[in-house]
Image: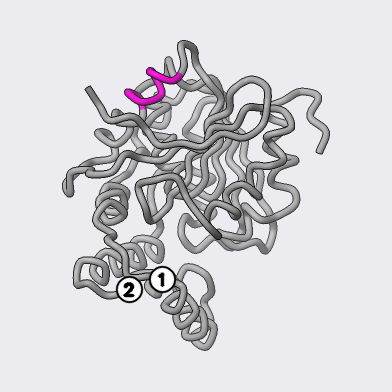
Amino acid sequence: MSDPLPFFTIGDGPPLVVLMFTPDAANPTGLARWSATRMVRPFARHFTVHVVNRPAGLPANITMTRLAQVYADGLATMFDHPVPVLAISTGASIALQLAADHDNLVERMVLGGTAHTLGPIGKHAQRNYIERATAGRRPSPALATVVTASTVGQRLISGLLWLSDGRKDRTDAVAVLNAEDGFDLCDRLSDVTAPTLIIQGERDRVYPIEFARRTAEGIPGARLVVYSGISHSGTFTDKRFARDALAFLVDDAVI
């Protein structure tokens, strides 16, 4: 039997599953918990929001297909019917694989900041993260290149990320990012049958906008909303994100 998925819940109403990447295979705590709760709070007015994470101890060579199976097994024990899914970034890559492989579990989904595969900059940054973590170095500075194209900005952000990156075991994070490194659902996008909305920042450096457009075109009936001038992380903090996602998930949603 698969290990249960760690999750925390807020709100009241029908279920909404939220998938996002966290460095730790556990419920977030401290600032990470505050940040996750702040992002999903608008949805908690309409749903019982289940912020679901991966179990600890993933195999180092796990694939995205196998990772989606882990989530599928866990969600099947939590719910006896398809549920809507809200997923961002790497969590949305998992959601895409989940929807393609296990369409009986996903009722509809909103994907923020994602595509059928990583772009070159995102792939390079994640590989750098993996190399640093494997070598026992603080890995998060590797992600500075996906935040800004400015060399000066990258140096500043890299330093801030280094300061905020505690010396923790990143084995599970590396396993997930390795799985995403090999992830490319381009040839299987038509297998995603759940109604899908993709929300993407025009200046997303992790999953380029042209990749997001290709993804939306490949999923039958999918819609794409583009935020002009917005970066990858800026997509999820934009005030329009909850409004647009809820308009898709709930007919009479009022923010």
Q: Which residue is mark 2?
A: 138
Nearer-the-camera pick, 120 or 55? 55
Residue occupying image coordinates x 16% and y 46%:
61
- Percent x, y of residue 252: 81, 24
- Percent x, y of residue 156: 51, 84
Quadrant including the C terminus:
top right
For the view shown, which residue lies furthest in the bottom direction? 152
Q: Amino acid at mark 1?
A: Asp
Majority secondary structure of magenta residues: helix
User: Splitting the image into 4 quarters, where does residue 14 fall?
Assistant: top right
On residue 165, the disc is 1
Q: Cα distance, mark 2 to mark 1?
A: 6 Å
Q: Is residue 202 above or below residue 187?
A: below
Q: Residues within 10 Å of mark 2 (few under 14, many from 20)?
A: many
Q: Amino acid at mark 2?
A: Arg
Left or right, residue 159 beside residue 243: left
Query: Helix, strand or loop at disc 2?
Result: loop
Residue occupying image coordinates x 24% and y 34%:
66
Asked if residue 18 is among those painted magenta in the image, a careful observer would answer no
Magenta part of the chain: 72-78
Count of numbered circles in the view: 2
Residue contact at pointers 2 and 1, CB within 8 angstroms: yes
